[in-house]
Image: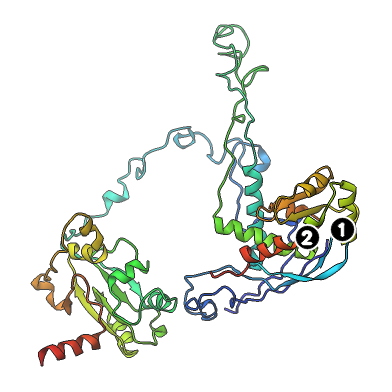
Amino acid sequence: MPPRQAPEREFIALNNLKDNPGATHSIKRVGRGIGSGLGKTSGRGHKGQKARAGRSPRLGFEGGQTPLRLRIPKRGFRNPHSRTYRPINLDMLQQWVDDGRLPTDRTITMKDLRDSNCVGRKMGWGVKLLARGAQHIKAPLHLEVSQVSDVAKAAIEGAGGSVTKVYYNKLGLRALLKPDWFAAKGRLLPRSARPPPKLERRFDRIGALPPNTELPQQRQAAAGAAST
Amino acid sequence: MQAAMFTQKAAMAGCAAPLKAAASIRSSSARPSFMVRASSVAAPVQLDVKKLDGSAVGSASLSLKVADADTANGLVHRYLVMVRQNARQGNASTLTRGEVRGGGRKPYKQKGSGNARRGSKRSPLMPGGGISFGPKPRDWSISMNKKERKLALATALQSAAGDMIVCEDFGALEVVSTKGLLANLAAMGVQEGEKVLLIVNETNEKVYLSGRNVPHMAINAGKAVQVYDVLNADRIVVEQGALAYMNEWFGAGEQ
């Protein structure tokens, strides 16, 4: 779409002030004469239950016919162990990095994403990285998130970055995002929980509390120095 | 009134912090922009500086951070509506049928009188009765974001820049005299019959006493400029100190 032409400025005076188009709309006023189109019966037709004041059948009632919600069969069950992750796409991530709201000199953790308002408060079990806008990723970014889609991971690693899938349980996620809550109650940060054995292969590492925000190459160098 | 048509330069140089590359957000068409700043610093408008006797002293400029052209009018409109609405006292009051004195007894029996049935002599159908949905004392005030309000006032001032004359110093007025003040204004370029707004640097007793009886003259202090007076005036005479304050407060700041 071609860029919109900015309208030329006009001299603002008391006799040409008006609201932006779409800012106001006039409400429907019923029962005010023939010309309005909503006079007399006021859009209700003639007689019957629906025409009466204060009376109409309850929602979903179909006059006695078996309603839709009873005609359709029930299906499935609700899994209490299911985990939902908050999605975040690469275009938004890159926008935040461009605006300087996310750090590039260290690993970006889910705490950074929350604090910069890249994701909202309701995170479920963590953050999943998805790949809309993958073509915008150019520079290396190092992230620690709960899950990542294959396309997103390929895009980040193609630019020289890295994505690590870290596991936090609900308590651990709270300790990651709000460490001050524990301090205010006089509690220590909890130890990081291991994932359930069934889910071990979905994660690369257990999330650390407080998070370790070194870059992967720094961490490797430190590990190499420690082992020698 | 002169139309101050000025082209808008997207000069972010004055007000952009180094990290916020607004130009890159707008120019990349495929990426959604999450940070929209519908404002930019306007191109400076040159104004003549004059002494009270009308002699030219130099020139000054006005360059404020104003709203984008497509929303500027709507923004100033909203701000003016808010200012005027907030000034309402909201004292209009009427009585409902319950509040009008009398009307507790049923005037005549329900059936048999031949007239329409009535329960009270003060119903809204009757003369002397209550009012159905009449006004009651209410608060008309509405609020608007502080930054929006500031931007709206700046937009109105910049739009009126074509009508501005800068006065070097109103303090030079020695005598309280309406005639004298009007003569000075005429010398500075205010035509007869024009509505004029004086923006003084700080509350000036002499100017106020000289000017308060002049119809269609408003006097504002530099730190409390009223948007209605700005839009209503045909000419605005700004004291140089007040102009400097405007450029600083409304202009391209560190933000």
Quadrant where the N terminus of chain B sits is bottom right
- Give a yes or no on whether discs 1 and 2 share a subunit: yes
**Can you identify the residue that label 2 sits on?**
B169
Instruction: Say how the picture is coloured.
Output: rainbow
The residue nearer to you, when weighing B99 against A110, is A110
Horizontal relation, residue B170 to residue B142: left or right: right
Horizontal relation, residue B248 to residue A17: left or right: left
Q: Amino acid at mark 1?
A: Val
Q: Chain of mark 1?
A: B
Under tag 2, what secondary structure?
loop
Quarter of the view holding residue B147: bottom right
Sequence-wise, the earlier of marks 1 and 2 is 2
**Can you identify the residue that label 1 sits on?**
B190
Q: Position of residue A217 (x, y in %)?
A: 24, 88
What residue is at 88 percent from the left and 60 percent from the top? B53
For residue B83, the mark is none
The residue nearer to you, when weighing A162 against A53, is A162
Quarter of the view holding residue A74: bottom left
